[in-house]
Amino acid sequence: MHSASNGHKQGQTPHDLVAAHFESSATLPERFFQEQAPNIARACWDMARRFHQGGRLLAFGNGAWASDAQHIAVEFVHPVIMGKRALPALALTNDSALLSGLAPGQEDGAFVRQLQTLARAQDIAVAFSGAGRDANVLAGLSLAQRMGLLTLGLCGGDGGQMARAGLDHCFIAPGNALLQQEIHETLYHVLWELVHVYFEHEGLLV
């Protein structure tokens, strides 16, 4: 019989694996948010100002990260807390017919075409990428920068090209893909909440 299976270290029990996962789930997010708190506050301020100027949030990403784009969009359009205003947001990943129709034969992918058609200078581009290396996501961000949008990148690993793209704000989540998505989900909930805090002092956003 094999002494270890599925890549588990020899001698690890299921209890050890569960304990290790929950330790990472507790310590890595806590460290991330402690370190990134000033940057998150600045990003929320910039987002609140764009919304105040009539901007919209345009979110995009590939695969599992497309669901994060959809999640952040619905958070802003349909607030879960009563009394909070709805803010305009759209996930560019929602329309499968549009995505599949635009993608074939286009080197940069559908996100560029959508941004060319939909985006305005006062808008906000929020892009998700597991390792910061998705060519179509990076192309969309590059176009958003040239058009004058506020650009936010949420990625993992070492950040890849996304971390070196000169975005207005880039947040690199530590850990494996599961932890990265946990951190990103908490992050965009914080972004939503703090944007609304700034809107409570709307006179400062002019």
Image (cartoon, rainbow, N blue to C red):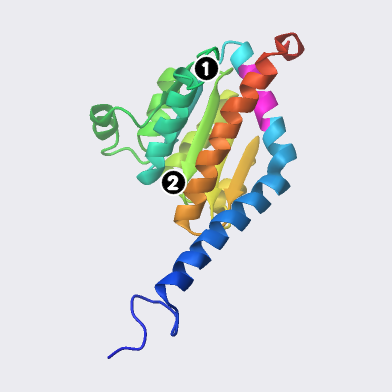
Secondary structure, magenta segment, majority class: helix
Q: Is residue 10 left or right of residue 167?
A: left
Decide which of 16, 104 is in the foreground and name it.
16
Inspect the image, locate mark 1, and give the three-letter code of the amino acid beneath it: Arg
For the N terminus, give its image quadrant: bottom left
Residue 39 picture quarter: top right
Q: Range of the magenta residues? A: 43-50
- Left or right of residue 30, residue 130 in this image: left
Q: Residue at x 60, y 51 (%)?
A: 29
x, y percent for residue 61: 42, 39
Type of the residue with mark 2? Ala
Residue at 48 percent across and 20 percent down: it is: 79
Residue at the front extreme?
Answer: 15
For residue 60, what is the image quadrant?
A: top left
Residue 138 horizontal/vertical position (percent): 49, 42
Depth order, front residue of 164/37: 37
Q: Can residue 47 be seen by looking at this rendering? A: no
- Vertical order, 106 against 3 (above or below): above
The x and y percentages for residue 134 are 44, 48
**Residue wearing tag 1:** 120
Query: How crowded is the residue under tag 1: few (<14 C-alpha within 10 Å), some, or many (20+)?
Result: some
At a point 32% along the width and 29% down the height, the residue shown is 94
Residue of label 2? 135
